[in-house]
Image: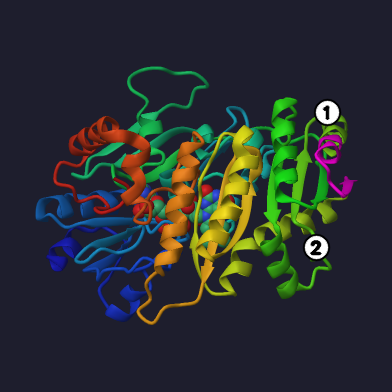
Amino acid sequence: MIDELAARLIGGRLITDPDVVDAYRRDHAHLVEPGVPLAVLLADTVEDVSAALTWAHQHGIPVVPRGSGTGLSGGATATDGCLILSTARMTTIREVSAEDQLAVVEAGVITADVDRAAREVGLMYAPDPSSFEISTIGGNLATNAGGLRCVKYGVTRDSVLGLEVVLADGRIIRTGRRTVKGVAGYDLTSLFVGSEGTLGIITSATLKLRPPPAAEPVTVVGSFTSIRAAAEAVAGIVRQGLGPSLLELIDQNTLRSINEWKNMGLDDNMAAMLIAQADGTDATDCGAALAAQFEAAGADFVAVSTDPEEAAQLLEIRRLALPAAERLGRCLVEDVGVPRSKLPEMFERLEQIAAHHQVRVMTVAHAGDGNLHPIFVFDPTGDGTVPDNIWAAADEVFRTALDLGGTLTGEHGVGVLKRRWLELELGPDVMEVHRSIKNALDPTGILNPGKGF
Ligand SMILES: Cc1cc2nc3c(=O)[nH]c(=O)nc-3n(C[C@H](O)[C@H](O)[C@H](O)COP(=O)(O)OP(=O)(O)OC[C@H]3O[C@@H](n4cnc5c(N)ncnc54)[C@H](O)[C@@H]3O)c2cc1C
């Protein structure tokens, strides 16, 4: 069968050497045990992807789409006997149009490279997941990735105009448009975004660009003596209708672990840090209003800066959170979201859950979006499994988020790790609708089986 696939390909690199294949079995969700793939295809063109899916459809071979493998929910993890289909070598930026404020890029382009290309014509690509220097646009689209700037500029879905997608049977379709408006037909572009490789393989995208802020952003940092106070500040900022371009929270455990590692001179007694930015023409006023909200919520230290270097250092603290946790043990990286008015309650419940189950939790949050990343850190078990108390604590965190009107996943996706909870959020009827859509687009179920739903 592999020979038959090789004969059908025009380009691409087909790998069957088990040692090389091994490097493609996992993504960044290290807790998910991968299967053994049949082969890996590093596709170069949409025709390679189409040929591979036609072949897989005819033979009933499962296909696991893959970008950079930075996903945190196990979505790109290999299943037994699958073809791993990587779009990471499809790195052409086909067009950057200043006139129409859009870019057409292949799925393997690194996210930050899209932004750099946009900056060359005086525009920007807004979505900026913390992994933006290593993740691909295809992966971002498939997970509907968020980022630090999405509190103001929206998530990946808000920056997509159209897609080129290869369907499960190998047909190549184009969805969406290049125009600002357009309502012809169902919004298939939005359907494929966030579908975690279960409905089709994205090979290129037409992305929305926008003018960058006119000046350097104003950065506001605040230190709090309780995490509840920091969360109250966020809720206050939302209530006041202030429009920060970034609003991130880092808890004490995370701050201490970063400080221990990088010796950044952070105060170990700080219970939480908030970092906010304001950009645009009203940045100075907005920065002052953000600082006032920090103070009103009880911050014991607040500073406002327009120095880009200071801002970069503060954002570096935020970006170090995950690697700092990963130095300390194995990590279950979670991703719940709650309405922002419920953030104080969610943080409080999180502390209670950690204490009750005696687990170590480090939390960072895209607080302006109500999106928390509690990272459960634990010692490796002999057989590599997640200890029961970690799952029990995670289960309680998920149920708490749902009770507060929230969601199981704000941006990392369902993948493998969240599957058993999904019906709790969606309910049986919505699950059934999902199954109907899946059956319509992938009747033989070859696309990323065992992931998502
Ligand atoms: C340090 C670090 C920081 C992170 N920060 C953030 C963050 O701020 N925000 C955020 O949202 N995520 C974040 N992530 C998670 C991850 O980077 C994102 O989920 C990213 O979108 C995955 O991109 P990728 O190219 O690595 O995709 P992969 O991990 O390879 O794949 C992710 C999913 O997309 C599917 N897929 C990949 N390519 C395609 C394609 N071409 N067509 C169809 N399906 C495809 C895969 O099957 C899988 O289900 C972070 C991860 C790390 C390691």
Q: In the displayed structure, would residue 5 be above or below residue 424?
A: below
Residue type of the residue flagged with mark 1: Asp
As drawn, the residue found furthest toward the front would be: 356
In the rendered structure, the answer to whether residue 272 lies left or right of residue 138 reads right
Residue 258 visible? The answer is yes
In the rendered structure, the answer to whether residue 441 lies left or right of residue 27 reads left
User: Which residue is found at the position 79% from the left and 34% from the top?
Assistant: 214
Callout 2: SS:
loop
The residue indicated by pointer 1 is: 282
Q: What is the image's colouring?
A: rainbow
Instruction: Give the percent coordinates (x, y) of residue 108.
Output: 45, 54
Depth check: 209 or 405 in front?
Answer: 405
Quadrant of res 322? bottom right
Q: In the displayed structure, would residue 184 be above or below residue 449?
A: above
Mark before the other along the chain sequence, 1 or 2: 2
Q: Residues within 10 Å of mark 2 (few under 14, many from 20)?
A: few
Instruction: Give the percent coordinates (x, y) of residue 140.
Output: 48, 47
In the rendered structure, find residue 325 and report the number of the disc placed on it. none
Task: Calculate the distance from the C-alpha at mark 1 to the C-alpha at mark 2.
Answer: 34 Å
The residue indicated by pointer 2 is: 269
Q: Which residues are magenta?
A: 292-306
User: Which residue is found at the position 55% from the left and 44% from the top?
Assistant: 146
Callout 1: SS:
loop
Depth check: 275 or 76 in front?
Answer: 275
Q: In the displayed structure, would residue 8 be above or below residue 264?
A: above
Q: Is residue 272 magenta?
A: no
